[in-house]
Image: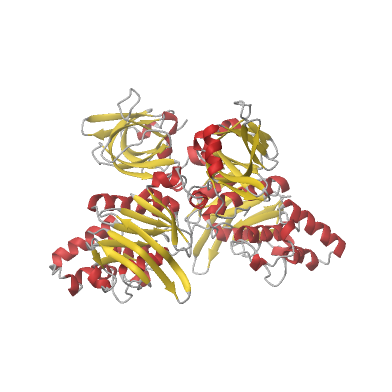
Amino acid sequence: MVQVRFENVVKYYGRKLAINDLSFTVKEGDFFSILGPTGAGKSTILKMIAGIEPVSSGKIYFNDIVVNNLSPHERNVSMAFETYNLYSHFTVYENIAFPLRAPKWKLNLTRDEERKRVTEIASFLGIDKLLERRPQALSGGQKQRVSLARALVRKPQVYLLDEPIAHLDAKLKFSTQTLLREFAVNYGSTIIYVTHDYREALALSDNMMVLRKGKFDQIGTPEEIYYSPKVDFVGRLVGEPPMNMIDGELIQQDGKTFFKAGNSFTIELDKKLAESAGKNSFKADGKTNTRLGIRCEDIRPSMKKASKNSFQLPVYVIVHEAESSVISFELENTFMHARTSESDVFRNLKGSDMVWLDFNTERMLFYVKTMEISKA
Amino acid sequence: MSRVDCNNVWKIYTGNVIGVKDLTFTCNDEEFLAILGPSGGGKSSTLRMLAGLEEISKGEVMFDGNVVNQMGPTERNIALAFESYALYYRMNVYENIAFPLRARGMKNADVDKNVKDMAEALNLTTILKKKPAELAGGHQQRVSLARALVRKPNLTLLDEPLSHMDQRIRAEIRAQIRRIHEEFGNTTIYVTHDQAEAISLCDRILILYNAEKQQIGTVDEIYNKPVNKFVAYFVGQPGMNFIKGKIEAHNRVYVNSGDGKKVVNFNGEVDSKYIGTEALIGVRPQQIKATVNKETTSVLAGDVKIVEFQGDNDVLTVELGDTGKTNIQVVVPAGGIRFKRGDRCWLEFDPNFVHLFDNDEKSIIRR
């Protein structure tokens, strides 16, 4: 088990910059997720740690040792790929046992010991009935669990898992996610996990990184990422619906500060919020603008005016889910969503009806604009 | 617009493979109905028979009371939108939407009015001159929908329209599809394997599994009155928990635990024939209340094994103190207690939301 550290790592594919001067540390025994959209550079990072891709410049450390020049097997990592990479002429059992038999690890297990290890991990992942089959006879979801079992069967310095449950159906994905968390908790190994699904990253990680175009926007605990995104991009990537991002103008009037979101609404900011908004403002068309970020559960809808700060908007549509309802509003360049657990209050609500809204001011965040937001 | 009836419809493929078995249901005029189920359950066969793309082996499909079995897809006047948008890539958005109208020989002036009205309704006015390749997925989706709706169809059929879409825009597209349905008042049938999508979009849900109808009902009926274990587990994320129990009386079931019988109360009653038999007690993770201390209403206790943070809630995996050491999941909403691994936790079940399933996995409580 090791600590993994990146020091000013740069990676070019030809002329294309994939990883841009990246430095970060994964603590020993940490479950560390890398979350980002397609093309952000997530898999490239894993491949560089594994030694499959060389770095263009910078250093990768395992504890205090620079591993740049070590071959993949000298690094002693275990990897699961999104694409499974199973040996089609082997049975499932042989595929999972393969890393245990590789001479380089000098495990020298007896047949019984080997069978015990393979069966254990296979039953843990619910594929113990498939051990005698060949990969061709498996569904995509089954293949993916075999690939995962093969990665987990051995105890390496670090586990590298690249979207290892992306192809499972929703129910199985959720239960396998729980198993992975259990595995991490029981074995306390260093695990680096790549995903584009924010729910997996939040549920599994001790710490996580949000990656955008080869650089990270934020590293923190799942709670920090969810409740205090540092950049608008992080807020948009995490949560469903994504965090509302409302662009507006900051207006000073009679010693008071107001946030004016186009023609939709204007709200007064208290001193603390005004200060935060001022720090995160930017100039556009000669006006002082800022971007307000607020999660849908922090906007409280009601049918009556609830406070002096309440304001009214026409409903675009209401969508009732099993345990809550999401009311959507159309603003100038985006939609705003509010979630309520009081579904019954809004049961007969229709498009164009007016609803009163209150923002939870403690959860309002202001951002400099680093990405465009438009209606889908 | 149109009401759809399926009466004892079968689809039997060569080799006697049954795709759809004796399916009967009604989709009312202006209703938004989801057909939900895992892959291989018969959803697509059903949709294709409604569309006229596949022959009906037995039974009748009726639109507004008229049998349409023998009609081709065009005669049925159906709008179809598939998960792949199938737009014409060489034409701009305007021409894509206009295509079905021109194919009917409509006059230019009428085409123009229809296309513009539709574009207005679906928020596409600003992109009419663009080519599909220049558009984001959500826009392409709406163009596909606009082209389907511009003919004023009797019925709109949507087959997994969101399955390849980025999660960040899904909520938005769902909202738009729902709004379009409300504005146009079309009868819409929506096929999906995603239970969350079915729940949030539709008025009623039909669940197909193993070629058979399991249940049809409103979201509330499906979620809170599932007829069998399959429906109970398939709908809801995470799915319903099941704990082994024994039925003691019409209105009593208990769980065996290390320190004796724990009675689980439920509202309603079961038939006398079940008294003395074993049954599975079903409780949704979202409908369990977890507390640190034992309350008078606590039913069972367990140890927290795993905590998964989900943003707006925590999902706990709790090992119960019953003899089977059952693992169940509990959803604790944000703002509630933050449990940690190893914590003891007491669980309270709402008697209105406790379910019982017999050996055949059928729900047996009469309320």
- Looking at the picture, tell me which residue is in the foreground, B134 or B341: B134
* Image spot of residue B332 (x, y percent): 40, 37
| Depth check, front residue: B53 or B61 | B53
Q: Is residue A306 above or below residue A248?
A: above
Along the line of sight, which residue is nearer the eye, A353 or A28? A28
Using the rendered view, name the quadrant where residue A190 is placed.
Answer: bottom left
Residue B267, quarter of picture: top left
Residue B217 higher or lower than A129, as above or below: above
- In the foreground, B16 or B289: B289
Count of all numbered marks drawn on residues in the image = 0
Q: Is residue A35 left or right of residue B113?
A: left
Q: Say how the picture is coloured.
A: secondary structure
Q: At 62% across and 54% down in the image, what residue appears?
A: A376
Q: Residue furthest front?
A: A255
Q: Position of residue B150 (x, y in %)?
A: 75, 58
Asked if A79 appears above or below B23 in the picture, the reply is below
Position in image of residue B162 (x %, y %): 57, 56
Q: Residue at x 31, y 65 (%)?
A: A60
Is residue B338 visible in the rendered structure shown here? yes
Q: Position of residue B43 (x, y in %)?
A: 54, 57
Decide if residue A349 is in sight here: no
